[in-house]
């Protein structure tokens, strides 16, 4: 066995607890307690089709009902495609996982039931795999055989290969030969043929699987392909890791998804000449996202992040990482993970140190990552935080929300990033991935075309922090070495320039927005708040005038021709929250409700609308408990804006220079 030496396995057996063994059995009970079921042809499609199209939640998978798929929200039954094919993809995943888990159980317990189940699964796939037809059609993805995309093929094969490594010694030469030739080598060759020439988390997964198969079969051709070719693992690390250590796709979930692949390889390769730990971007990528944990204890749902993927639950990465590279950051993240759960788990058993040091849990912190394009401001006194996204365009898993904003008040996300849902659900492309469902500028209710913002200023002192950035669509569009599908409207944003500066005061955030709109397109500065609108006598009900993602907005109301107004919200568990607006010319204000995430509840939208050639606004987000802030005396001229903030009988006046993007507090 390659994964662990005989001495290591003895130690693992001695430390394994009954609860760990029971957990492995329970996690695989569907496969363990049923006859082995392996598709005889390539009928499996995509697991992300297995979502309710209305609620955006995963359907309930039932081993005994391959033709009936139930929404857990309302019990509605779905039949036929794409759900039937997704059911089989789920089964393939369970079978592959069982090969690894039950193979490990056999090593720990030596009970033959586990060996026989893994043997039967591997031989069944080896029987059918070479004849599975190549099929696909999943957006952005290459084809599969057992499944409908190359990524899924890699995900299954890595578990099949590691499971084989656990039981190889108990197989006959004929069985070994069949599994190695008809399953593992067939899989590696298919993955090598269909690995794409792009930076992508998929290619990290595909490379890792090819490399693991190469290590297990002692085939250096596979390992060299996985590591050293263009778009291999080192290429991905060298070109896909941005600046401070963020994976270029800009999603914390896909950052860790890429690292999960990398560590699946490294857990086997770390004591060999093929270890990737010497690549400097390896540790940078492991550490950087830990700085993005917000004051609600979660990662922000930047870009493609399905509900739940924002949670800090990465013991499978950090148990190994801490043992290989002990450091404060990894000790802190493990402390955070185990605050409310036991460490009695398989990852700690296989890869962890015997005893973790005492460490403080990960906490929210202010950071300014200029190259990654993420700035977080945190006020510990009031437990408020803000994230400002000025990141470069990241390709497929990016969202079209340059200069987007997240606000947390007293540890609660009130201006959220919604993330997304399963990619096969209509709500993914039809709603969550769109510019209109983010706290940023929307033109003609169309998606922003790819642009890399320019950081204009970052200014921090004891009194305040200022972050200013610009998205200028008169400049060259952003390009990324990754496959993309055009889902934006380049003409709508042509020559538009969006300048956003945010003044952070801890218990308030003030936006200074300037939009140059030479072709007089329809501009909507968009905000969604996790709450409900407070009554406003000026609002009147209208037929929804919005197209695209917000065509589904309900209870639409309008306030016409405003230069100053306040929008209040009721926030569950908190006092009310107010936004105070001031514009340099009349704007319309549209409010309504559209889906939160999950789509079982709604979120309150407010849109500031104009089609003038220039739009300038000041917006005060009052994060104080007593909502005591007032925005007053806003004066614009060609080169600057002045405004006053009054709070608790104290007035502070600020001047923001539009030429040099500096802000100063004027003398009283």
Image (spheres, grey):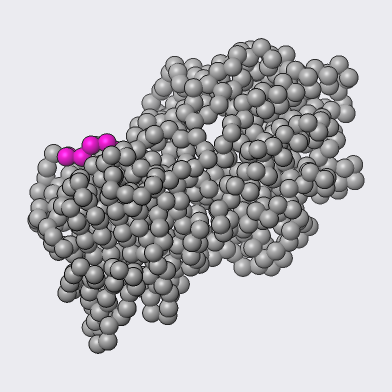
Most foreground residue, 371 or 182: 371
Q: Position of residue 164 (x, y in %)?
A: 78, 29
Between 469 and 67, which is closer to the camera in this rendering? 469
Question: How many marks are shown on the rendered structure?
Answer: 0
Looking at the image, residue 609 lies above or below residue 486: below
Classify 121 as above or below 350: above
Taking the image as shown, residue 598 lies to the left or right of residue 27, namely: left
Query: In this rendering, would 305 be left or right of 196?
Result: left
87 is higher (above) or lower (below) than 501: above
Q: Is residue 460 magenta?
A: no
State whether the magenta stretch is mostly helix, strand or loop: loop
Looking at the image, residue 627 sits to the left or right of residue 313; the answer is: left
- State the image coordinates of residue 490 (x, y, percent, origin top left): 32, 40
For residue 530, say whether it is visible: no
User: Residue at 28% of width from left, 64% of height from top?
Assistant: 512
Residue at 84% across / 37% down in the picture? 2
Asked where in the image residue 130 lies, by quadrant, the reply is top right
Which residue sits at x=16%, y=63%? 584
Q: Place residue 26 in its image quadrant.
A: top right
State whether residue 371 appears in this view: yes
Q: Quadrant of the N terminus?
A: top right
Q: Which residues are magenta?
A: 544-549
Q: Dividing the image into 4 quarters, which one contains the C terminus? A: bottom left
Vertical arrangement, residue 142 with respect to residue 430, above or below = above
Residue located farthest toward the bottom when viewing the structure as drawn: 668
- Seen at 20% across and 46% down, the residue is 519
Q: Position of residue 19 (x, y in %)?
A: 72, 45
Q: Nearer the viewer, residue 571 or 137?
A: 137
Measured from the top left, where is residue 248 in percent x and y?
Answer: 53, 48
């Amino acid at each position: 066995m390659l994964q662990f030496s005989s001495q290591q396995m003895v130690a693992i057996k001695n430390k394994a607890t009954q609860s760990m063994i029971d957990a492995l059995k329970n996690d695989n009970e569907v496969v363990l307690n049923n006859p082995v079921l392996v598709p005889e042809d390539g009928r499996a499609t995509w697991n992300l089709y297995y979502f309710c199209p209305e609620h955006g939640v995963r359907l309930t998978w039932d081993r005994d009902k391959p033709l009936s798929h139930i929404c857990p929200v309302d019990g509605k039954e779905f039949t036929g495609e794409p759900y039937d094919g997704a059911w089989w993809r789920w089964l393939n995943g369970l079978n592959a996982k069982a090969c690894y888990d039950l193979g490990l159980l056999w090593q720990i317990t030596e009970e033959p039931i586990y060996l026989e189940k893994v043997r039967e699964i591997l031989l069944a796939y080896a029987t059918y795999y070479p004849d599975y037809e190549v099929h696909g059609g999943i957006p952005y993805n290459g084809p599969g055989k057992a499944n409908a995309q190359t990524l899924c093929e890699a995900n299954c094969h890595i578990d099949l290969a590691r499971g084989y490594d656990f039981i190889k010694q108990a197989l006959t030469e004929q069985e070994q030969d069949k599994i190695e030739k008809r399953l593992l080598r067939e899989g590696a060759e298919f993955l090598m043929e269909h690995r794409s020439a792009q930076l992508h988390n998929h290619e990290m997964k595909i490379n890792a699987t090819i490399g693991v198969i190469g290590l297990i079969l002692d085939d250096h051709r596979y390992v060299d392909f996985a590591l050293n070719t263009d778009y291999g693992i080192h290429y991905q690390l060298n070109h896909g890791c941005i600046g401070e250590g963020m994976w270029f796709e800009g999603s914390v979930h896909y950052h860790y998804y890429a690292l999960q692949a990398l560590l699946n390889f490294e857990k086997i390769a770390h004591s060999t000449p093929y270890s990737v730990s010497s690549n400097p971007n390896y540790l940078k990528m492991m550490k950087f996202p830990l700085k993005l944990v917000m004051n609600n204890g979660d990662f922000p749902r930047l870009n493609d992040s399905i509900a739940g993927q924002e949670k800090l639950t990465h013991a499978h990465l950090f148990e190994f990482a801490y043992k290989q590279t002990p450091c404060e950051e990894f000790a802190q993240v493990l402390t955070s993970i185990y605050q409310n759960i036991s460490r009695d788990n398989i990852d700690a058993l296989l890869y962890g140190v015997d005893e973790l040091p005492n460490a403080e849990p990960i906490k929210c912190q202010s950071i300014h990552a200029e190259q990654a394009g993420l700035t977080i401001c945190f006020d510990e006194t009031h437990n408020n935080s803000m994230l400002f996204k000025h990141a470069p365009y990241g390709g497929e898993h990016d969202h079209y929300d340059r200069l987007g904003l997240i606000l947390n008040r007293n540890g609660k996300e009130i201006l959220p990033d919604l993330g997304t849902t399963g990619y096969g659900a209509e709500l993914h492309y039809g709603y969550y991935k769109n510019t209109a469902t983010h706290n940023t500028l929307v033109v003609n209710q169309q998606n922003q075309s790819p642009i890399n913002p320019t950081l204009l200023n970052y200014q921090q002192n004891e009194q305040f922090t200022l972050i200013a950035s610009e998205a200028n669509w008169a400049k060259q569009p952003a390009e990324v070495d990754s496959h993309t599908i055009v889902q934006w409207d380049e003409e709508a944003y042509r020559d538009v320039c969006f300048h956003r500066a945010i003044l952070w005061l801890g218990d308030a955030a003030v936006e200074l927005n300037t939009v140059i709109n030479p072709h007089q397109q329809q501009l909507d500065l968009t905000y969604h708040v996790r709450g409900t609108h407070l009554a406003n006598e000026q609002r009147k009900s209208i037929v929804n005038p919005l197209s695209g993602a917000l065509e589904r907005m309900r209870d639409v109301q309008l306030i016409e021709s405003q230069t100053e107004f306040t929008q209040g919200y009721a926030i569950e568990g908190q006092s009310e929250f107010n936004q105070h607006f001031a514009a340099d010319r009349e704007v319309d204000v549209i409010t309504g409700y559209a889906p939160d995430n999950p789509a079982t509840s709604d979120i309150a939208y407010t849109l500031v609308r104009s089609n003038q050639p220039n739009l300038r606004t000041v917006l005060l987000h009052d994060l104080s408990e007593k909502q005591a802030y007032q925005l007053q005396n806003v004066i614009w001229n060609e080169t600057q804006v002045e405004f006053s903030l009054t709070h608790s009988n104290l007035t502070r006046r600020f001047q923001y220079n539009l030429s040099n993007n500096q802000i100063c507090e004027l003398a009283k």
